[in-house]
Image (tube, helix red, strand yellow):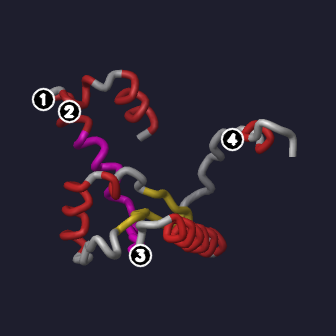
Amino acid sequence: PGPLLHLAVKFPQLISGRVTGRILKTVYLRTMKSVPAIAWMQAPFASYEDYVNCGRSFMRVWLALTAQGYVLHPYGTVPTNEAILAEFASVVGASQTDAEPIWMIFRFGKSPVPPESYRLPLSSHFIEEI
């Protein structure tokens, strides 16, 4: 998926092409066939307190899975796309509501340790030294 993503970012017109779009979609969907498990989280998600509580819950789930030797990959864009989110909810039988929306979808499973992503040092995120 890495080279495919790079290609799609560098040449976004390929995604909308009739033939190239179909090819890219087919190749991408093949990468999903090995996904052992998909999970989602639903909770109130309308206030700052909700956001913090959901974030804490998600990090606890992530840490618990990691402690058991699993790796997790969030599908960050699905909850922000109403049409795809509605299709996902229908497929998995989730009752999507305004009061308790699906705010996180992720896949997880056993895997070799993934490569670490580049991170800026903490100090680069602050205007003043801490």
Q: Which residue is mark 1?
A: 18
Find the distance from the CA under tag 3 to the CA under tag 4.
30 Å
Among all residues in the image, which is located at the extreme left? 18
Looking at the image, which residue is at 28% across and 52% down? 81
Q: Give the answer, above or below, for where 73 lies relative to 124.
A: below
Find the distance from the CA under tag 1 to the CA under tag 2.
5 Å
Q: Nearer the viewer, residue 118 or 85?
A: 85
Q: Which residue is mark 3?
A: 43
Q: Are marks 1 and 2 in contact (CB under 8 Å)?
A: yes
Position of the N terminus, as image quadrant, is top left
Looking at the image, which residue is at 24% across and 41% down? 25
Q: Give the answer, above or below, for where 33 lies relative to 16.
A: below
Secondary structure found at label 2: helix
How packed mark 2 is, by other alpha carbons closer than 10 Å (few <14, some 14-19, many 20 or more), is some
Which stretch appears magenta? 25-43
Q: Are marks 1 and 3 in contact (CB under 8 Å)?
A: no
